Image: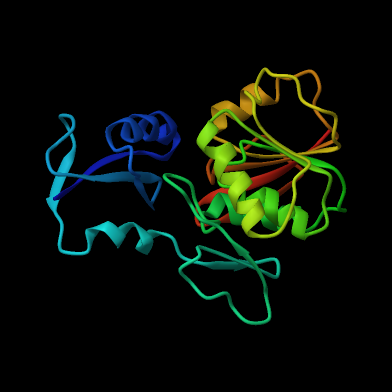
Amino acid sequence: MRRYSLRVPADQVEPALATMLDLFPDGVEQEEDEGMVTLSGYAEQAPAEGLECEPVEEGWEDAWRAFHKPVTVVGLWVGPPWFEPQPGLEAIVIDPGRAFGTGAHGSTRAALALLAELEPGPALDLGCGSGVLTIAALRLGFGPLRSYDIDPLAVQATRENAARNGVAPAEVERRDVLVDPLPAAPLWLANLEMHLHEALLRRNDLPPLVVASGLLDSQTLGGERRVVADGWAAELLVR
């Protein structure tokens, strides 16, 4: 068995991840370092040309778990099910599924830091991934909370993780949040890449508040409040 990797700039990770998932349908690891992202999968033979290759040792099947570690943020413990939650903190247990995070990513932590500063109320999670922001928002008192993602795997992961944590979003559906109709809500949570944010913000039904995360530290949407974590930024946009 060998480990095959592709290293790309952080702002190009979405199409690269889609390619790697096609090549490695059982799952993809994701590592970040100084604005670059390394995506890796396991196979007996190279599924495509141009991938870095290295042999793996016995126990490779569980190696991907090493890349998903718990974090604490705004009084919440967020982590995968193979770790014990930290005593005294409210736990959010996230199974990352095939290719989604568990909440340790800087963009997620930055978004949660901004979210905790806001008055709870109805919200939409646009691009819900594994459901971290959905579940955390519900735990922080936001709701009704509706969650959407174009990827059916993300919809499934959000539903399963919400049930695992004993919370119930009002809706979890597959939608293209850039163009499909969305219900009215005073707050949008959007953990997306810069070019997707730019398209999202061209919608004519923008709410009063948007927590936009997934930005590199060098990028900005001109938000009124900004939080940075591990080189990733979230901004609060106020209309």
Give left or right: position of 218 versus 60.
Answer: right
Camera-nearest residue between 13 and 54: 54
Colouring chosen for the image of the structure? rainbow
Label tally: 0
Give left or right: position of 162 versus 100.
Answer: right
**Residue visible at 26% across and 57% down in the picture:** 61
**Residue visible at 50% across and 57% down in the picture:** 230
Q: Residue 213's x, y, as percent?
A: 62, 43
- Quadrant position of residue 123: top right
**Residue visible at 42% across and 40% down in the picture:** 10
Q: Is residue 19 above or below residue 96?
A: above
Q: Residue 228's x, y, as percent?
A: 60, 54
**Image quadrant for the C terminus?**
top right
Q: Residue 133's x, y, as percent?
A: 66, 50
Give left or right: position of 57 versus 126.
Answer: left
Give left or right: position of 215 versus 36.
Answer: right
- Quadrant position of residue 38: top left
Q: Is residue 227 visible?
A: no
Q: Residue 169's x, y, as percent?
A: 75, 45
Q: Is residue 90 above or below residue 50?
A: below
Q: Is residue 83 visible?
A: yes
